[in-house]
Every structure is written in C-alpha cells, then in structure tokens.
Amino acid sequence: MTAAGDYVRAASPTAFVHDDTTVANIASTSYIPGTPEVGVYFIGPPSGTVRLTIGGGFRDNGGSADRVFLSPELFLENSDGTQVLAPSVTFRGYLSVAQDTEFQYGSRVSMIEGLIPGQLYYLRTDHLATPGTDPDSADIAARDIIVIPMP
C-alpha cells in the first residue's frame, strides 16, 4: 500500500510467447515440455500475483479418442531452478476434446498468487497425451502463454 508522497513501483510488463510449431504423434503419457520448449521469463510483481493465460491448438488425428493436456510449469529463475508450480490440467491447464479430428483452439485463464516480488520466474508449457484406442495420434498446432502482472 502506498501513501501520499510514496514512490509507486510500476508492474513488470506483460510476458507472452506464441509458437506454431506442429508437434505430431504425441506418445508421452507423462508431462514433457516438447520441442521446441515454449516458455517465458517474468519478474514477480509487487502484488505477488499474475494472471496466466495458457492455450493452443490440438487434435486427435486418428479419431481414436486421444486427448492432449496442456499445462503450465513454473520455476524460480529457469527450467533448472526450483519448481514452484507442477503441471496440472485440473487447475490451470487446457485439454482437447476426444475424437476431434480437426484442430480446436482454446485457452484457460487463472491467477497465480504468492509470488516473490522482484524474483525472476520461468513459466513453460508441458503436455501429455491420453492414449485412446490407437496411441500416438494426437497433435499440437500451437502453444501460447500470456503472463500479466496484477496490481
């Protein structure tokens, strides 16, 4: 909180990344970052809270009920740093519809609270595929991250 005459610290700028590299025939049933790794660096804002949007384009190219789960993973400083947020589609991720053979695009918005103001963070996308009747038939067409500091 600021009082009259205090300096007001500006929030860090919005951090974002978009990658449209196709990741085809996903076989991993555990979260992996994929190639290329899609991530952004940002500084924890004075409020300790950021708004996260994660999304992309996904399909089941075989019509065999494969689904793609796209989730954020957050680290202190870089991907070799301490993990702050483990990937979870349940709380902050986005998932595709089974048997959707055309690319569907969507996103999910959530808040990440309790960040350390001034700390460098690295946030990346991780994904996995749930095997349908024919594994290795889910694709990603795009991955996106937007991190907006909250006042």
Image (cartoon, rainbow, N blue to C red):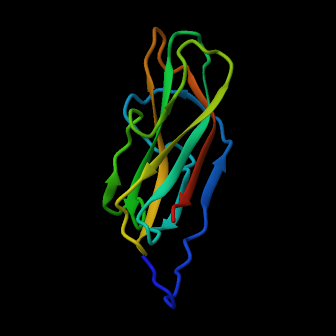
What percent of the width, then of the height, locates residue 3? 46, 84
What percent of the width, then of the height, locates residue 10? 56, 77
Q: Is residue 55 above or below residue 6?
A: above
Is 109 left or right of 86, judged from the image as shown? right
Residue at figure coordinates x 51%, y 65% from the top left? 151
Q: Nearer the viewer, residue 112 or 21?
A: 112
Residue at figure coordinates x 34%, y 46% from the top left? 86
Q: Quadrant of the N terminus?
A: bottom left
What percent of the width, then of the height, locates residue 102? 68, 19
Q: Is residue 24 above or below residue 38?
A: above
The residue furthest front is 4
Q: Is residue 32 above or below residue 48?
A: above
Residue at figure coordinates x 46%, y 37% from the top left? 93
What percent of the width, then of the height, locates residue 81? 34, 63
Q: Nearer the viewer, residue 19 or 121?
A: 121
Q: Is residue 48 above or below residue 28?
A: below
Quarter where residue 87 is shown: top left
Instruction: Give the total number of marks visible in the rendering.
Output: 0
Residue at figure coordinates x 42%, y 34% from the top left? 89
Q: Nearer the viewer, residue 97 or 62?
A: 97
